[in-house]
Amino acid sequence: MARRLAVGSKMSCMRVVAERPGRTDTTPHWHENEQWVVVTSGTVHFVAEGTEYELTAGDVAFIPAGQRHTLVQVGDEGAVLYELSAPGRLDLVPGSLVPSALRFD
């Protein structure tokens, strides 16, 4: 997956290009940031609190802070999506000394 990132103190936006279809190795996690997922092309499947959802181009999902979730599948044609987080995910900046916001418990 290729990622591009823009980060501010109040919000961050990451563009994710998933070129290879199939299952992902994303570990279920949660964080203290609210997150929006906007799919601009392709299809992705993700699980939030045990329920699986299919998102296609034009779909938007909101993941509240503290909700366990994971991306589980990318459709046959790959996908492009944007992840918007508030407050901003400074831990995603390359070389950042900020601890990861991801929690796995």
Image (cartoon, helix red, strand yellow):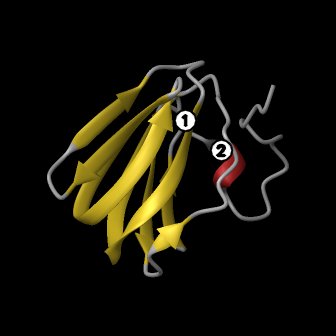
Q: Amino acid at mark 2?
A: Leu
Which residue is rendered at x = 31% and y = 35% of the image?
61
Give above or below for 91 relative to 79: above
Which structural element holds mark 1? loop
Q: Amino acid at mark 1?
A: Ser
The C terminus - image quarter: top right
Alpha carbon distance from label 2 to label 1: 8 Å
Residue at x 43%, y 81% (from the top left corner): 19
Residue 54: image location, x then y, percent? 30, 47
- Residues 34 and 52: in front is 52
User: Label for residue 103?
Assistant: none
85 on left or right of 28:
left
- Tag in front: 2 or 1: 2
Camera-side residue of 84 and 94: 84
Q: Is residue 16 left or right of residue 78?
A: right
Q: Is residue 1 left or right of residue 99?
A: left
Q: How many marks?
A: 2
Task: Decide: few, some or many residues near mark 2? Use Cα within 10 Å; few <14, some 14-19, many ≥20.
Answer: many
Camera-side residue of 30 and 94: 30
The x, y position of residue 57, in whole percent, is 18, 58
In the picture, residue 102 is in which quadrant?
Answer: top right
Q: Secondary structure at mark 2?
A: helix
Instruction: Check disc 2 and report the residue beneath it.
Output: 90
Looking at the image, tell me whether mark 2 or mark 1 is earlier in sequence order: 1
Quick one: 79 or 87, which is closer to the camera?
79
Q: Badges 2 and 1: C-beta atoms under 8 Å apart?
A: yes
Q: Is residue 73 left or right of residue 82?
A: right
Q: Position of residue 52 (x, y in %)?
A: 41, 37
Residue 9, labelled with which disc?
1
Residue shown at 64%/29% (left/top)? 30
Seen at 45% across and 73% down, the residue is 18
